[in-house]
Image: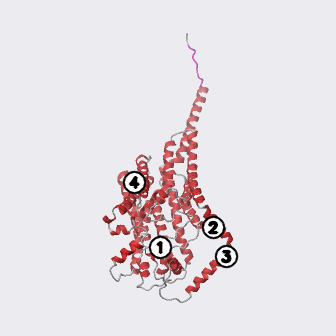
Amino acid sequence: MMRPRFRIGSAAKSSIASTVEGYALQNKERAAETRLLWTPPAAQRELAPLSLLACALVIGLLLGLLAPPTNQEGVDGSLVLAGIVHYPPQSPMSRYFFGSWTIIHQLGALLLRAGLDQAYVSELLFLVPCALLVCAYAAVVYCFSGQFVFSLLAAALCFLTNPLAKFFASPDYMPVGLLWSQPPVQTFGFWAHAGAAWVVGCVAAGRKALAIFSALCLIAVHPVLGVYMTVLLTAALLTGRLLFATSMDGVAKGAVFGSAIVVVSFAFYLTTRPDLSAAIDQAAYDAYMNVWDTHRSHLMTPGIATRIAVAGAIAVAVLVAFIVFARPRRDAPLLTSGLVMLAVIVSTIAYFALHLTPDLLPAIFVRAAPGRLLNVQAFLSTPMALGLALYAIGQAVRERTTDAAAWIGRALPVAALVVVAAGLTQSVLSRRHLMIDGARMMAATRGLEETSARDTAAFWRDVRESGVTGLVLTSRATSRPTLDFGHLPIALNVGAFD
């Protein structure tokens, strides 16, 4: 028996073809939407938009303005260098202030001589690293996620709370600047850590010239961290060039301008640097290191060693996996991962060498307090983890064209922000009693604070106008206020020497 044959008319064929084309087009649109969400084209991702960097800088400035006010330690050297506070040439503190090289003192003195109020100079010394830190976070997250708004929100939250930092932070050297609610007064440590994060952020933004320029300028800000970041960045750029043929465009120009800044700053320092009148008293130096030093005298306990080793191993494993398997290969993500990986490896080795074999290390290496180098990855831990996690998940779903995959792609950034926001909430709740007590104190003393501030200002004005000459001996707690507000040369500030 013959089976009947069915013929499809031309109209039906056209309808079926249109339906198939419609589904194909819909699937292509979904795939393009998912790819746009996670892995934009190289032309979009290689350079972070200037608008992103500008917005992040503004957010950092606003967050810094909302933080509790500080009296930055960098002001004291600026006052001395500007000639507002006068020291006898042979006094120990004179040798400290004029014998210490940092462009922070030089720029602060320039602003003071130009007539800018001392309070504004102190505020600038705090706000600039805040802006650089938020901008670096935004660039790092954008480098791996390609999300404009998400990167800005994540950067702000990472600045407010950095939940992963505690696993990488140095036990030898306090990572100043990680707690927004407790703004640091340690100008040099804050600038050093924020500057190091900014260098990584410039690499993540695809701006290598700015990165090498900033790393070299960091030498004039904080010589130890500046040299460290310059060496790491140079090694990362050369390795990327050899292994992945990454571009070196603009690096030479950035290096020339950065070196010029360092040379000018150092030349000015040499004109003010005092000559030592005698050889260093080694016994006095050893006594100081044993009694007063607080950065090289910490013991490495088994728990601390395990934390640092495990955190470093996990970080290196994740970064190696990204470098090996990431597709497509783009300069910015590769160089950022390589730079952070080098920082983790070098700083971890330096920390264990300092604590396990200190007698085998050069004296200059020990004086540089290499334990602080762990804080570079501590500052970058949460934004790096966030960006890498989003990239990995995006790679897993980017080729899927189902509605579920598209919704997952939209939901994951929100979920990641919720996780970071939860960390911020937990941080706030852990200090809620202190915040409540502070609010009660403010309410109870409303109206008295302005009176107290006026009385304090009047007191220091009277001190400045009292005609006191010579060195002033104070307690450790009052040494900085006496110099900063009374403009009197204190005889000794033990904390400053370190």
Q: Are marks 4 and 1 in contact (CB under 8 Å)?
A: no
**Disc 3 from disc 1: Cα separation:** 35 Å
**Disc 2 from disc 3: Cα separation:** 15 Å
**Disc 1 from disc 2: Cα separation:** 32 Å
Q: Measured from the top left, where is residue 5 in percent x and y?
A: 57, 17
Task: Indicate which disc, 4 or 2, sits on the residue closer to the N terminus.
Answer: 4
* Res 356 → quadrant: bottom left
Q: Are marks 2 and 3 in contact (CB under 8 Å)?
A: no
Crowding near the residue tagged with mark 2, few <14, some 14–19, many ≥20 C-alpha atoms within 10 Å:
few
Check disc 4 and give the amino acid type. Thr
Q: Measured from the top left, where is residue 341 in percent x and y?
A: 41, 55
Q: Residue furthest top?
A: 1
Check disc 2 and give the amino acid type. Gly
Question: Mark 2 falls on what kind of element?
Answer: helix
Check disc 1 and give the amino acid type. Ile
Residue at the (45%, 76%) spot, across then down: 494
Q: Name the mark on residue 104.
A: 1
Q: Name the mark on residue 438.
A: 2
Question: Mark 4 falls on what kind of element?
Answer: loop
**Does the magenta portion include 393?**
no
The residue tagged 3 is 448
- Can residue 44 be seen here? The reply is no
Residue at the (55%, 80%) spot, across then down: 485
Extent of the magenta region:
3-9
Task: Indicate which disc, 3 or 4, sits on the residue closer to the N terminus.
Answer: 4
Task: Indicate which disc, 3 or 1, sits on the residue closer to the N terminus.
Answer: 1
The residue tagged 4 is 246
